[in-house]
């Protein structure tokens, strides 16, 4: 499946338990077998105190494929203008119009 031009959520791998959760929401500009280039906004989730920070301005990042835990394709109607964070129980989610919400963090 070609995801060039699609809106995606890229979750980065965690290599140790204390590492912050980081994901990137945006549109795929280029993709190869070794990396993916995405224009969008990053989200970092902190465990203590529990909070989520979103990049103020969109940026372009080139992500090595070895650093990606997973990629979720988002509806084309998803926009980066107003990212809304929701909580359910002990989990954080990004609200996705026209689709199921996508998780940010695990339960604590």
Image: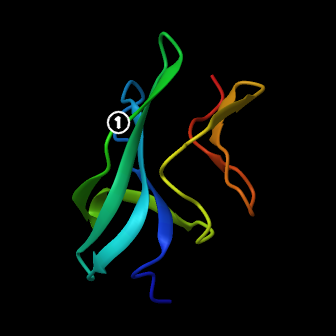
Residue 30, picture quadrant: bottom left
At 23% across and 76% down in the image, what residue appears? 34
Left or right: residue 14 versus residue 64 is right
Residue 47 coordinates in the image, percent (x, y): 49, 19
Viewer-side residue, 4 vs 81: 81
Residue 58 coordinates in the image, percent (x, y): 32, 50
Viewer-side residue, 30 vs 80: 80
Left or right: residue 77 versus residue 17 is right
Viewer-side residue, 61 vs 80: 80
Residue 19, above or below 74: above
- The residue tagged 1 is 56
Residue 44, above or below 95: above
Q: Looking at the image, which residue sits at the far top?
A: 49
Residue 48 coordinates in the image, percent (x, y): 47, 12
At 30% across and 75% down in the image, what residue appears? 29
Residue 37, above or below 23: below
Secondary element at tag 1: loop
Left or right: residue 64 versus residue 75 is left
């Amino acid at each position: 499946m070609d995801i060039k031009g699609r809106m995606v959520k890229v979750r980065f791998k965690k290599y140790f338990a204390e590492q912050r959760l980081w994901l990137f929401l945006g549109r795929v500009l280029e993709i190869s077998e070794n990396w993916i280039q995405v224009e969008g906004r990053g989200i970092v989730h902190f465990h203590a105190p529990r909070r989520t920070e979103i990049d103020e301005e969109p940026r372009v990042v080139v992500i090595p494929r070895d650093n990606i835990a997973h990629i979720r394709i988002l509806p084309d109607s998803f926009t980066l203008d107003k990212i809304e964070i929701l909580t359910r129980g002990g989990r954080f989610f990004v609200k996705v119009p026209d689709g199921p919400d996508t998780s940010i963090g695990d339960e604590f």
